């Protein structure tokens, strides 16, 4: 397996972010992790991708500087939320980098960043598909637990997603 570097993404890197996201949407093993299809997002205009690239994201790059993994972090504060929190979305690791600890390091960076925010984040949350057992087991190993909240999977409302959270230590 190749080595990698984890860092934050910058808004001017939106083209690389778009390329990895579209690749992720074509990955059959990752399909349950996303609430959009490749065809839908491939049709987005450049301004949508520029806007998305303004979201705090952590990426992993291989030795050649090519992106191999991503997680975006949404900061959620305000009256509509019980506590200041972050929401992890768009978690993706290329197949050849899975199983070697990259996802643990990538999410570790996003979680550590969350705890350092001046908003006083008290929990990190995410949603995981009922059939995505590998992801559920991975998140549990990181300390995430189900909250009891569920929602219909946006691409097929007969399926369920579970909310999982990691509370501030």
Image (cartoon, rainbow, N blue to C red):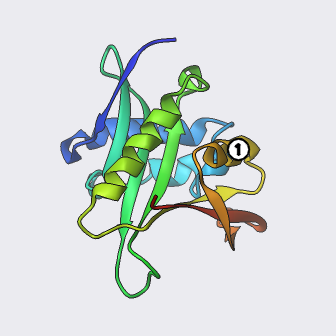
Horizontal arrangement in the rendering, residue 104 relative to residue 122 (left or right): right
Determine whether the residue tagged by mark 1 lies in a helix, strand or loop: helix
Foreground of the two, 167 or 55: 167
Q: Position of residue 21 (x, y in %)?
A: 46, 42
Asked which quadrant contains residue 27, the reply is top right
Any part of residue 52 in sight: no
For disc 1, the neighbor class at 10 Å (few under 14, some 14 to 19, many from 20) is few
Horizontal arrangement in the rendering, residue 142 relative to residue 61 (left or right): right
What residue appears at the point 37 percent right and 42 percent down from the top-left corner?
109
Foreground of the two, 69 or 14: 69
Q: Position of residue 144 (x, y in %)?
A: 60, 55
Foreground of the two, 60 or 109: 109
Direction front: furthest residue: 169
Direction bottom: furthest residue: 79
Q: Position of residue 86 (x, y in %)?
A: 41, 63
What residue appears at the point 73 percent right and 47 percent down from the top-left corner?
132
Q: Position of residue 135 (x, y in %)?
A: 66, 44
What residue appears at the point 53 percent right and 27 percent down from the top-left corner?
101
Q: Is residue 110 above or below residue 167?
A: above
Q: Is residue 77 above or below residue 70?
A: below
Direction left: furthest residue: 12
Asked which quadrant contains residue 165, the reply is bottom right
Foreground of the two, 36 or 106: 106
Residue highlighted by disc 1: 137
Q: Is residue 97 above or below residue 146?
A: above
Horizontal arrangement in the rendering, residue 13 relative to residue 141 (left or right): left
Any part of residue 92 in sight: yes
């Amino acid at each position: 397996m190749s080595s990698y570097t984890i860092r934050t993404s910058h808004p001017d890197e939106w083209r690389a972010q778009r390329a990895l996201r579209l690749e992720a949407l074509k990955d059959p093993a990752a399909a349950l992790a996303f609430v959009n299809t490749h065809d839908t997002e491939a049709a987005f205009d450049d301004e949508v991708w520029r806007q998305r690239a303004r979201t705090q994201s952590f990426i992993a790059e291989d030795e050649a500087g090519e992106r191999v993994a991503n997680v975006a972090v949404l900061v959620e504060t305000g009256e509509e939320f019980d506590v200041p929190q972050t929401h992890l979305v768009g978690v993706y690791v290329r197949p050849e980098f899975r199983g070697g600890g990259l996802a643990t390091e990538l999410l570790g960076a996003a979680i550590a960043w969350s705890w350092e925010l001046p908003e006083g984040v008290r929990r990190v949350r995410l949603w995981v598909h009922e059939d995505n057992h590998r992801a559920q087991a991975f998140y549990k190993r990181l300390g995430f637990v189900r909250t009891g909240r569920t929602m219909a999977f946006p691409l097929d409302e007969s399926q369920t997603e579970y909310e999982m959270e990691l509370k501030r230590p």
